[in-house]
C-alpha cells in the first residue's frame, strides 16, 4: 500500500517542504560520492547510534568504537540522522510520502511552525527508537520518523481527505481512493504490528518501526494541541 497523492490542494506554496526535500536529496547525492568505507563512517558519525550514548560497543569494529567514543556527548545525530538515507528506494519512498502529505500540513501550520514541528517529530521518533533499542550499534537513519509525524498531523487535520493509493495484490496492481483516516490507521496498524514483532525478536527487517510509531503519535498529539490553541476549519 503506497500513497500516490491526496485530493486536497494547498493554498500556500510549501516552501519548507520543498526545501527539506532538496536538502535530503543533496545529502543523498553526496553519499553516492563516498567510498563504502567513507559512507559507513559517515553514517556512524551522523546517524543516531544508541550505543554511542549507552556504551554498548561490543558488536562494533574497534575503529568505529573509537569514533563513537570521541563523539559520545554529541547530540546532533538526533537531528542529522533525519537527513540521511540508505538507498534509492529509501529516499524516494520517504520524499514521495512527504510530498503527498507535507504541503497540506505546512499550509495548516504555517511555514516556520511546520519546520519546527518537522524537526521535533524527527527527534521524538529517534527518541522512541532509542528507548526501544538503547544498546543497538546500528545507525538509525532516515526521514521516515519525521514524516510519520507529518502523517499523524495530517490524520488530525484532514481525516476526510482521500488518498489515491497503489495496492499490489499478487501481480495485479490496484489504484483506488481511500479516505485518509482509513489509509493512515491501516498504515499505523502495520507499523505497530511490526514494531511489536521487533521487540519479541520475530522481525529482523532493520526498519526502525518504533521511530515511525513515535513520530506518528507525537505528530497527532501536537496537531491536536495546535488546533486547540489556533482553532481553524477542516477540509472535507
Image (cartoon, rainbow, N blue to C red):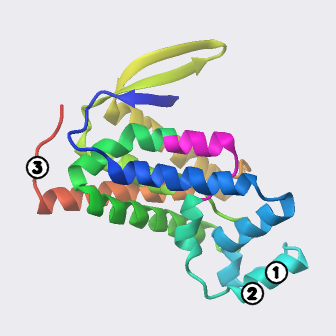
Q: Are marks 2 and 3 in contact (CB under 8 Å)?
A: no
Q: Is residue 89 within the magenta segment?
A: yes
One can see residue 66 in this view: yes
Q: Is residue 49 visible?
A: no
Q: Mark 2: which secondary structure?
A: helix
Left or right of 1: which side holds 162?
A: left
SS type, badge 3: loop
Label 1 vs label 2: CA separation? 6 Å
Q: Is residue 42 left or right of residue 117?
A: right
Frontmost residue, 84 versus 16: 16
Q: Residue furthest right?
A: 62
Please report whichever mark, 2 or 3, sits nearer to the chain's N-terminal start.
2
Q: Are marks 1 and 2 in contact (CB under 8 Å)?
A: yes
**Marks 3 and 1, the one that precedes in the sequence:** 1
Q: Residues within 10 Å of mark 3 (few under 14, many from 20)?
A: few
The spot of residue 224 in percent (x, y) is 23, 56
The image shows residue 54 at horizontal and vertical percentages of: 67, 83
The residue that mark 1 highlights is 65
| Res 69 label | 2
- The secondary structure that most of the magenta stretch takes on is helix
At a point 41% along the width and 48% down the height, the residue shown is: 18
Residue at which label 3 appears: 232
- Residue 147 coordinates in the image, percent (x, y): 45, 51
Q: Position of residue 162 (x, y in %)?
A: 31, 27
Q: Quadrant of the C terminus?
A: top left
Q: Which residues are magenta?
A: 84-95
Amino acid at each position: 500500500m503506497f500513497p500516490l497523492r491526496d485530493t486536497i490542494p494547498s493554498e500556500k506554496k510549501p516552501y519548507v517542504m520543498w526545501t527539506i526535500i532538496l536538502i535530503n536529496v543533496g545529502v543523498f547525492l553526496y553519499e553516492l560520492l563516498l567510498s563504502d568505507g567513507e559512507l559507513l563512517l559517515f553514517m556512524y558519525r551522523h546517524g543516531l547510534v544508541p550505543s554511542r550514548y549507552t556504551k554498548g560497543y561490543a558488536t562494533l569494529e574497534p575503529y568505529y568504537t573509537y569514533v563513537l567514543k570521541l563523539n559520545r556527548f554529541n547530540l546532533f545525530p538526533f537531528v542529522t540522522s533525519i537527513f540521511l538515507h540508505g538507498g534509492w528506494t529509501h529516499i524516494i519512498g520517504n520524499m514521495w510520502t512527504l510530498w503527498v502529505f507535507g504541503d497540506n500540513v505546512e499550509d495548516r501550520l504555517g511555514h516556520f511552525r511546520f519546520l519546527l514541528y518537522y524537526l521535533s517529530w524527527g527527534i521524538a521518533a529517534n527518541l522512541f527508537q532509542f528507548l526501544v533499542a538503547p544498546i543497538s550499534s546500528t545507525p538509525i537513519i532516515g526521514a521516515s520518523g519525521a514524516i510519520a509525524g507529518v502523517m499523524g498531523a495530517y490524520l488530525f487535520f484532514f481525516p476526510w481527505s482521500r488518498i489515491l493509493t497503489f495496492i499490489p495484490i499478487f501481480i495485479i496492481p490496484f489504484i483506488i481512493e481511500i479516505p485518509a483516516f482509513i489509509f493512515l490507521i491501516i498504515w499505523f496498524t502495520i507499523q505497530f504490528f511490526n514494531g511489536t514483532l521487533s521487540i519479541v525478536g520475530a522481525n529482523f527487517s532493520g526498519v526502525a518501526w518504533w521511530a515511525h510509531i513515535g513520530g506518528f503519535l507525537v505528530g497527532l498529539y501536537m496537531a491536536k494541541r495546535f488546533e486547540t490553541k489556533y482553532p481553524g476549519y477542516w477540509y472535507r
